[in-house]
């Protein structure tokens, strides 16, 4: 008996989901590599005799390299394509992750961490660009949420593993191990990924048509010239960037100094520090997933892109402000950890939404658009670890966290002015 025609219809392949999975892995590696040092701070200080202020400058050197090379990194991805660009920069930063183990004084470690930051700077802009030609618009919030959830999950898994490696082999061993992981990923990425669905041998015509139809059938931008004047004239982008300054300042407090805070101020030993430093980042992982998913769900049900992005992010910042405040002020150390979990959960709700907006407004130049946002954000991220030791010395450990709570409120106000429907390139779908 002849089967009906519809039974023979070819289902779209799911190469785009494999691409998303590889991107999630890249995000995990970025945060694993950058939080290795925060978990090792107490041991490094003890062995090399670094003061807290010296350590603050070392941590900040990564952030300055990361902030200053965001735009060049995004430009690189837009110019040579994310396949080559991501493989190149992951190889670069993985080398300097391992090279951290060779540092012998403040200057050498600061230089290595700066060069490590230069490499990582392009990661998120280029990864965003790598998804712009693969992910359906209705999947963008989820895609950005799950990728950033991957980064926080990587960060959450890292402290206990670093503590175990340090106890067994010394503080240099984790840097060598994590650098090797990045090198392996870059080989896999270059072998599998292609810059567009049309170039990928594993994507069938049905998946290509699904993607082309969803993004308006446009061809990928092939111009070697990035339209910076148009990008930098976007009021929405600058408001988004100011908001991200507040976000990055706040999250840097937890990524760079929270293990030290638990050990120094809350009195947890090294093994307890490794455990409790992971919990807020696990909560943040859930926040990343919830933020991107709920924003896409809102968009599907209402069709209102502006409100779907705005409401979720504003709500997240308000939750963060409400959680960080009691975490700083309570005298109960365990309660402080749980309130911090709430604060980081709220803070991370906003991340997938923020990066989805760069896709919404940036289209094929999402790499360069997101690089501007991330540059401004990571200027805040660079100031944060450098300023914190001075705040602690002058006002105590409560001061940095009270400041972070206030910045979350400011970020909520700023996101009320972000309009994801105001596309930079008029006429893009």
Image (cartoon, grey):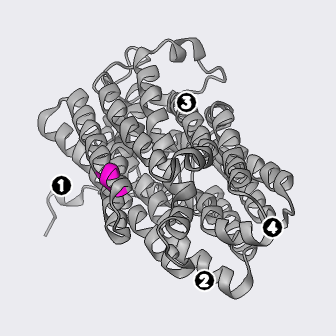
Q: Which residues are magenta?
A: 323-327
First in sequence: mark 2 or mark 4? 4
In the rendered image, residue 72, in percent from the top left (x then y), is placed at 68, 32
Residue occupying image coordinates x 57% and y 38%? 378
Distance from Cα at disc 1 to Cα at disc 4: 72 Å
- Nearer-the-camera pick, 50 or 248: 50
Q: Quadrant of the C terminus?
A: top left
User: Are circles 2 and 4 on residues that touch, CB within 8 Å?
Assistant: no
Q: Secondary structure at mark 2?
A: helix
Distance from Cα at disc 3 to Cα at disc 4: 33 Å
Which residue is label 1 attached to? 5
- Discs 2/1, front: 2
Q: Secondary structure at mark 1?
A: helix
Which residue is label 4 attached to? 48
Distance from Cα at disc 3 to Cα at disc 1: 54 Å
Q: Which mark is residue 164?
A: 2
260 lies above or below 12: below
* Residue 274 seen in this snapshot: yes
- Nearer-the-camera pick, 13 or 250: 250
Which residue is label 3 attached to? 376
* Residue 131 part of the magenta segment: no
């Amino acid at each position: 008996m002849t089967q009906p025609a519809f039974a023979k219809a070819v289902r779209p392949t799911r190469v785009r989901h494999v691409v998303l999975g590889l991107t999630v892995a890249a995000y995990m590696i970025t945060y694993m590599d950058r939080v290795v040092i925060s978990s090792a701070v107490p041991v490094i200080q003890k062995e090399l005799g670094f003061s807290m202020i010296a350590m603050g400058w070392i941590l900040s050197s990564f952030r300055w390299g990361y902030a200053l090379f965001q735009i060049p990194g995004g430009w690189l991805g837009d110019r040579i394509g994310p396949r080559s660009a991501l493989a190149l920069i992951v190889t670069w930063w993985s080398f300097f992750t391992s090279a951290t183990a060779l540092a012998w004084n403040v200057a050498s470690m600061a230089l290595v961490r700066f060069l490590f930051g230069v490499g990582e700077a392009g990661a998120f802009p280029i990864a965003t660009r790598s998804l712009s030609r693969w992910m359906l618009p209705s999947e963008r919030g989820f895609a950005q949420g799950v990728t950033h959830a991957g980064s926080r999950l990587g960060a959450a898994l890292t402290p206990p593993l670093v503590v175990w490696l340090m106890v067994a082999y010394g503080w240099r061993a984790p840097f060598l191990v994590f650098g090797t992981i990045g090198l392996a990923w870059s080989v896999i990425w270059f072998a599998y990924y292609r810059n567009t669905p049309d170039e990928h041998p594993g994507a069938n015509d049905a998946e290509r048509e699904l993607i082309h139809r969803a993004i308006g059938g446009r061809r990928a931008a092939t111009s070697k010239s990035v339209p910076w004047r148009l990008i930098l004239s976007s009021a929405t982008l600058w408001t988004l960037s100011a908001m991200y300054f507040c976000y990055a300042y706040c999250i840097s407090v937890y990524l760079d100094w929270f293990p030290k805070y638990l050990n120094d101020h809350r009195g947890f030993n090294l093994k307890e520090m490794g455990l409790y430093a992971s919990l807020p980042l696990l909560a943040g992982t859930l926040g990343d997933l919830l933020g991107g998913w709920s924003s896409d769900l809102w968009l599907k049900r209402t069709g209102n892109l502006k409100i779907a992005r705005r409401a979720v992010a504003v709500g997240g910042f308000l939750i963060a402000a409400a959680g960080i405040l009691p975490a700083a002020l309570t005298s109960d150390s365990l309660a402080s950890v749980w309130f911090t979990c709430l604060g980081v959960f709220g803070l991370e709700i906003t991340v997938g939404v923020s990066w989805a907006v760069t896709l919404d407004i940036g289209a094929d130049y999402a790499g360069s658009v997101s690089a501007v946002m991330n540059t401004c954000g990571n200027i805040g991220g660079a100031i944060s670890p450098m300023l914190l030791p001075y705040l602690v010395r002058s006002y105590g450990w409560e001061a940095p966290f009270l400041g972070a709570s206030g910045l979350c409120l400011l970020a909520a106000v700023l996101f009320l002015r972000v309009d994801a429907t105001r596309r930079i390139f008029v006429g893009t779908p």
